Image (cartoon, rainbow, N blue to C red):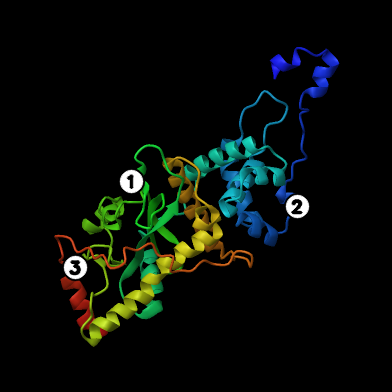
Amino acid sequence: MAAFLRFYDDETRKSLRRQRIFRDRLNPLNSYCDEEMIKRFRLDRGSILSILDNVGEQLERPTKRSQGLPASIQLFAALRFLASGTEQRVIGDTLGISKSSVCRSIDKVVQVLSTSLNTIKFPSEDADILKTKHGFYSIAGFPNVVGAIDDTLIPITAPKPDEHLYICRKGFHSINVQAIVDSDLKFLSVVRKWPGATHDAFIWANSGIARKFERSEIDGWLLGDSGYPLRPWLLTPVNNPKYRGEQSYNGSHRKTRVVVEQAFGVLKSRFRCLHKTESALNYEPEKCCMIAYVCCQLHNICIDLKLPILEEDEMDDINDADRDGDLTYQGPLNDGKTVREALIRQRFL
């Protein structure tokens, strides 16, 4: 462009250069009611202001210009992307900022929130554990349950290194996210570092929460599908149930464990950037894992505040379960069978 312009006089060069456009920025805090805020950003005004109070200083970027991008605009840009998966240029046009500013805002906000939010906690106090067990028992009479476990696939664009590791059993590139939830669909534990081709049982075996159960640091059972190993602390369905007790056990197990599938359905309905209908996350796998984790953290805030999923965001089929179908993993230490059989005799005959 510079070589082209040197053949013209000063006035002509000035007229040919693209003029810099200063846009009027939209501050959603001054423009939307709570219902509109939830519809566009998934959080209400109070929770957004609370997040800004906690991380606002970390989001402010030093600049030599007269005005840097406010922390609130950065947060709204990132929340809009997480909520909708919308193209960054469209988000920029809505908020009155450039596409590059949206991109930088998403990077910064996701990085800050991933370390600053602390909403994913496994219950440790006796009162909290008892409350969790009561919540599960009220569903279908399954006792002593402290969580339901499953994995879900988050679509991503094909990474260059080790691409084959990210092709999941459904044939697309993804990361495999393992989560444990309670009866309120709240995430208690999230493991988000494995490629899509990784088996659910392998993710579980290499997780910190598994080791806590193995060391008997947690009192209670997890409910998992047949993709997980049967253990004294992780109960799976009976394959080919032969009598009434096993059938009753399977029915109660299915009705209780379904909350984890529902949680994934609500998560992906709320934060459409994670859903396959909105294309795939166009970032490196590490960044995609961070985005998924932040969405789970924000989901818990929505659950605590009982924020609705409004009409325009229909909940996805809860059977978006990314299970291994008929694959059954038992493993070498199948002593969970004794626990399961005793439970069936005592509770489901």
Real-space CA distance between mark 1 and mark 2, rounded to the nearest whole angstrom: 45 Å
1 or 3: tag closer to the N-terminus: 1
Amino acid type of the residue tagged 1 in the rendering: Leu
Real-space CA distance between mark 2 and mark 3, rounded to the nearest whole angstrom: 56 Å
The residue identified by callout 2 is: 31
Determine the residue positioned at 19% across, 64% down: 330
Q: Quadrant of the N terminus?
A: top right
- Pinpoint residue 53: horizontal percent, then vertical percent: 60, 45
Nearest to the observer: residue 30 or residue 108 = 108
* Res 165 label: 1
Do the CB atoms of the residues marked 1 and 2 lie less than 8 Å apart? no
Nearest to the observer: residue 85 or residue 237 = 85
1 or 2: tag closer to the N-terminus: 2
On the picture, is 24 further left or further right than 135? right
- Pinpoint residue 299: horizontal percent, then vertical percent: 51, 58
Above or below, 245 relative to 225: below
Q: Is any part of residue 270 visible from this angle? A: yes
* Res 57 label: none
- Label 2: state its secondary structure: helix
- Label 1: state its secondary structure: helix
2 or 3: tag closer to the N-terminus: 2
- Pinpoint residue 75: horizontal percent, then vertical percent: 61, 44
The residue identified by callout 3 is: 336
